[in-house]
Amino acid sequence: MKILTLIGLLFLLYTSTSYAQSFNSEKLIEKCKSGVVYIKLSNSLGTGFLISENGHIVTNYHVIEGYDDSNDYVEFSDGKRYQFYLAGDDKDKDIALLQLRDFDCSECQVLPILPNKNGKTGIEVATIGHPKGLKFNITKGIISQEILHKEVPYMLRTDVAVNPGNSGGPLFNKNGQVVGIISARLEKKNLFDRDIQNLNFAINAVELRRFLQRRSIAYQTAPLIANSELSAQLRELSAEEVDAQKRAELQRIELEKQKEKERIGLEKQKEKERIELEKEKIRQQILESIKIDQLNAEQQKELSRLDFGYQKQILEQQRKLELQRIEEKQRRELLRLNSDEHELDFQQQKLRERKKQHIANLPRRVGFRIGGGAHYFAGTLSDLTKSYSLSRVSWVLTSGLTYRFDINNKDRGTSVGAFCRFGNYNATTVNTLALQQGLSFVSNSPINLFTEVEGGFLIKEWLRLSGGLGWQRINRTIASNSIVGTDFMYGVATLGFIARFGKQVALDVNMISAFALEYQHFSLRGEVCLVFRFTAGKW
């Protein structure tokens, strides 16, 4: 009774006045077929798609690896052919960008790319390609997993049927936008792989957009198929009907899961029966070869009239030949099974190496900076127009500890950090400072240390913005030749620019301002430091 109620509610869903959208394969191939190309090389074939009016084609790198630009070509659905050359590639991600020579195709459709994020798990998708050389075929399925694994975030999994010749082809959503590039599939190659069912992979839209943006290639995003072209008239559902619909959908999913389990179990049982049948056939063949020696009484009487020794020799030779044939067949089957097992191990090892290489290329999260250089006390804003003196130059040591929240395959990123500056002012400099800030004492000591601690950001490893507190000590020698120190605090802010020399050496140029607390006037300084960088951590 519950099932009948749910079916009735689903039927009412199609009599409403709002609109729902469905996947239309016929309209997809009508709109998008002219933007898909057939790539023919002397030793391979594949698929690609047009992404700009300038004749740029995107495909897999393994499709065009080792191409000959004088003989190989791409072909559009109208039969036009063009030669090409490689305009860019990312071998690790298996992406290639081709440039067509003398491209002029006004009827060819530039295919749009999904403008943001990735295609969601569960949405319907389709691909147009050339499986086994059969040109411009369409197959349909869903995105089974939006991101295959956190260590390979550029890959997705789909159940769209894929065969050799589909590599490099576009994966479309219902609006005709490209959400991925068909890349690979894991095949069932022998009877021990019977659990492998339609494992196909594609490079997702985020990685495709990143690849084109790094090469300043403009691309389109506007859908080729509007939602209004996919609409079917519906009415608004009540809350009870929505709940009923959800329950029906959950039941349908559970039913499909159960059917899939039963199908897998049935296939396993059939495979087991086939193996047993093969074993039984081999046993029967062996028995039949043995029965050659077991002649009946009439055959024995017939042999008695002939040369018994000669006939027996013939029968022995026949039995040996039959046994050799059976043994050779078993040996070839064993060699084939071993070869398939070695091939699977090789593919798994290759995938592990690609994952390891991807992790090795990621930048580290924690950074430590240490260095030193020259520090110049400029004074207040009114002093900037006056003459400069080398007597105000002093030494300074700097250090910093940074943390990068996000890591990707780019070396430069934004980090938050803590920074420390330790230096010294001579008597001339510190007396100038005291005079500008209205302090009553005068120093005659060459050692007047200061320390400044700040917190802030390193933006893309070239711009520093930070602020914090500073402590200045002014030493004076009194009549008894003893040294008396006076401490005072002030606020400090830094605007810095960083020039990198390799990954471990940088030149920091900082503009520093001191203000507030015991400072009566805004004061400026500058410094130049040579800094060494160290990084750690990829968690």
Image (cartoon, rainbow, N blue to C red):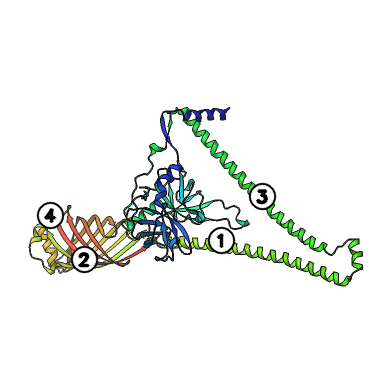
Rendered residue at 40%/62% (across/down): 361
Residue tagged 3: 270
* Residue type at tag 2: Val
The residue to which callout 2 is attached is 528
Q: Earlier in the sequence, mark 1 or mark 4?
A: 1
Tell me which numbered mark, 3 or 4, is placed earlier along the sequence.
3
Q: Earlier in the sequence, mark 2 or mark 1?
A: 1
Where does label 1 land, which residue? 344
Find residue 521 and name its label.
4
Q: Position of residue 79 (x, y in %)?
A: 42, 54
Is 245 left or right of 418, judged from the image as shown? right
Q: Do the residues bearing badges 1 and 3 touch, measured as CB atoms within 8 Å?
A: no
**Element type at marker 2?**
strand
**Mark 2 crowdedness (10 Å alpha carbons): few <14, some 14-19, many ≥20:** some
Rendered location of residue 456, percent (x, y)? 27, 55
Query: Disc 1 versus disc 3: distance between alpha carbons?
Result: 23 Å
Report the number of numbered marks.
4
Proximity of marks 2 and 4: CB atoms separated by less than 8 Å: no
In space, the residues marked 3 and 4 are separated at their CA atoms by 90 Å
Per the image, label 3 sits on a secondary structure element best described as helix
Say which amino acid is labelled 1.
Leu
